[in-house]
Image (cartoon, helix red, strand yellow):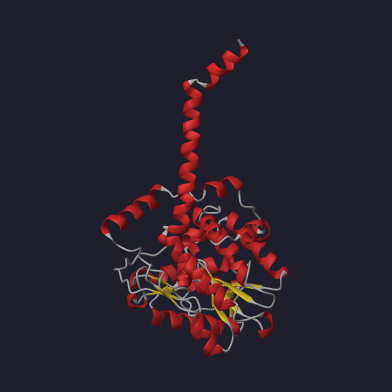
Amino acid sequence: MLATGRNTISRSPHVRVLGALLVGFCISWLASVVYLFTLDAPMENWVRALDKQDRWSQHFTAGQGPRLVVTGGSSCTFSIDGGMATEQFHVPVINGGLEAGMGAYGVLLLSSRLTESGDTLVLAIEPPLLLSPLDYTQDTLQLMIRRLEWDRLVQAKKVTGRAVPLDSLFFSPCPGLQNVAAFLGRVVTHTPYRYENAEIRAGGLMVTDFRYPLSKDGYIPGLSPGNRDVLLHFRDWASHRGVRVVYSIPWYYVGNERASEQKRINARFLASLSEIMPVVREEEFGVQTDPSLFADTKWHLTEEAAQVRTSELVKHTLAGDFWTADQLERVASAFR
């Protein structure tokens, strides 16, 4: 009777449905991993970019003197010409830019691979990211899986103060509906991924021929308590390794009528950030009113503008030209 009962349970519809769901999940998870490693064009583009960054970084060993590493979201990727700056200033300059979808955790964690004792790391993170909720984003975890960055995953808590949740890591290969729709759209329309053919220079600069109309509105910067704690932790971790961390606000397009207000807001934001780390002295506070400096977004510079931005940033950083909190507060008041 007991054996019969077990057989009845094993044949019950609920068990069969559960088994089918489990098999379906395993197949879909494996298909997601295959997609990530073979068909995910945006991820392949960022793998290509980071591989270029690594090769450029490996040109300059610790014995060749301190290096300047600049990191941030895609505004950094499209704004810093490491090759040009290295030749101009005779100091190794590395563009370690990523994309905003990596979030603050991802930018900090992945940039840590490029620094050595004696280096200066310039955080050129877009201010809106420092107001975003803190988490290891799917883009970050997918990129580390795709590049097999297991050591970086293990070190995450030391670098950012928070370990990578195992459940997030396990489910990260699964593409969202937006990614699936974008992939199917590219297949149906035979349209390549937007940056698939973008040129990535040896020093890390990404260059695109895309140009789009730009709106004139600004943005509201800020620093959430959680992001503040993360930056403090990262600064201390880097300092312990002999790496100096400073901040530079990225260039952003704003219409003339909004420029003064945006500068005032940015100066106040930088004043609060200067309590955590030195802020590079840049007189425009990231505000640019000439749309011809920008490519396909209000954060992405043209190649020519990137060279100007790079020269100014490297010059001020190497000279130790930083704002004080008092100076920034006075500037913010003057824009009223």
For the point 49% across and 23% down, the residue is 14
Q: Quadrant of the C terminus?
A: bottom left
Q: Nearer the viewer, residue 215 or 136?
A: 136
Asked whether the viewer can see residue 313, the reply is: yes
For the point 42% across and 58% down, the residue is 40
Across and down, in percent, residue 232 comes to: 65, 62
User: In the rendered image of this protein, does residue 229 appear above or below residue 84?
Assistant: above
User: In the rendered image of this protein, does residue 16 appear above or below residue 237?
Assistant: above
User: In the rendered image of this protein, does residue 291 appear above or below residue 308?
Assistant: above
Q: Residue furthest top?
A: 1
For the point 46% across and 55% down, the residue is 36
For the point 46% across and 80% down, the residue is 309
Q: Nearer the viewer, residue 262 or 332?
A: 262
Q: Nearer the viewer, residue 259 or 298?
A: 298
Q: Residue furthest left?
A: 189
Specify the quadrant of the image occupied by residue 122.
bottom right
Across and down, in percent, residue 313 comes to: 52, 80
Q: Quadrant of the N terminus?
A: top right
Across and down, in percent, residue 102 comes to: 51, 59
